[in-house]
Image (tube, grey):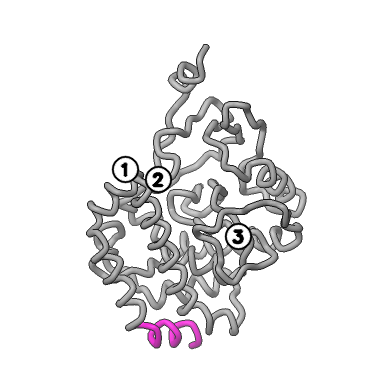
Amino acid sequence: MTAEGEMAEGQALVGGMVNAGAVFRRGALVERPAPPTARALHAHLLALEDYGFDAAPKPVGLAANGREQLTFIPGDVALPPFPRWVMTETALRSVGNLLRHLHDASSTIAVDARVEWPRSLADPAGGTMLCHNDVCPDNVVFRDGRAAGLIDFDLAAPGRAVWDVAMTARYWVPMLDPTSAAALYPTGLDIPTRLRILADSYGLSWQERAELPGVVEQATASCRAFIADRVASGDSVYTRALSERGGWQRWDRIQGWLAAHQEVFAYALSN
């Protein structure tokens, strides 16, 4: 049977943008395109469980056709526009706890310096810990209203913990102006309070709290550059999403809003 025929027998998993339409579940396994860093990433995922983090997929195989098999993590994954259940304060705290648990394990695993880890969403300051870099609602599995699994490590790269928290805050607080947030998120979210909840549930140090608002701005700029590269390469998924979500004017608005609210965020994080 051809690979295409095998995929047709599987259940297509929706969500995400990089691998849209190319991820399939077959029973207890997920088959998807393997990232260029697959071999090193598989070793890292296996080591995570050894160091106490059991909420990531386990690698099962790497095929010659450029696809990988991972264990399926059962539960619920929220897709945009995001439902209110995934934006509760309980859900947010559980995301912060899960990210901290991941980092506690990752910080004990040596990063393979010989690997060319993806730089598109990586911490420009670098680091010695492998960060996830894409902890968005599409990549978090929930059970009973709490984050229970973290998937899609394709963009993982060395960085600082505060960078991964900033990337996570962009999606889960969310760090968006009201107009942009209204298109994807429930109304009435208290942004400064939610930023503080994420910092508290993760356990950010006071120094990291002072850095976080500025790092969120840096992370937002990196995300914008990531999309610009995708659009320039002719990626139809990102080109369509950019158009449907307000184009570059939306990104200008978000970045202006972040800069204008730096003091508000700093106060929320320090009081």
Q: Nearer the viewer, residue 88 or 195?
A: 195
| Residue 236 - label | 1
Distance from disc 1 to disc 2, alpha carbons, whole Å, reads 10 Å
The amino acid at mark 2 is Met
Q: Which residue is mark 3?
A: 131
Instruction: Determine contact: label 2, label 3, CB under 8 Å.
Output: no
The amino acid at mark 1 is Ser
Magenta stretch, main secondary structure, is helix
- Look at 50% across and 15% down and name the residue there: 2
Q: Which residues are magenta?
A: 261-271
Q: Earlier in the sequence, mark 3 or mark 1?
A: 3
Q: How many marks?
A: 3
Q: Secondary structure at mark 3?
A: strand
Q: Nearer the viewer, residue 28 or 169?
A: 169
- Look at 66% across and 37% down and name the residue there: 59
| Rendered position, 159 above or below 44 | below
Q: Is residue 47 magenta?
A: no
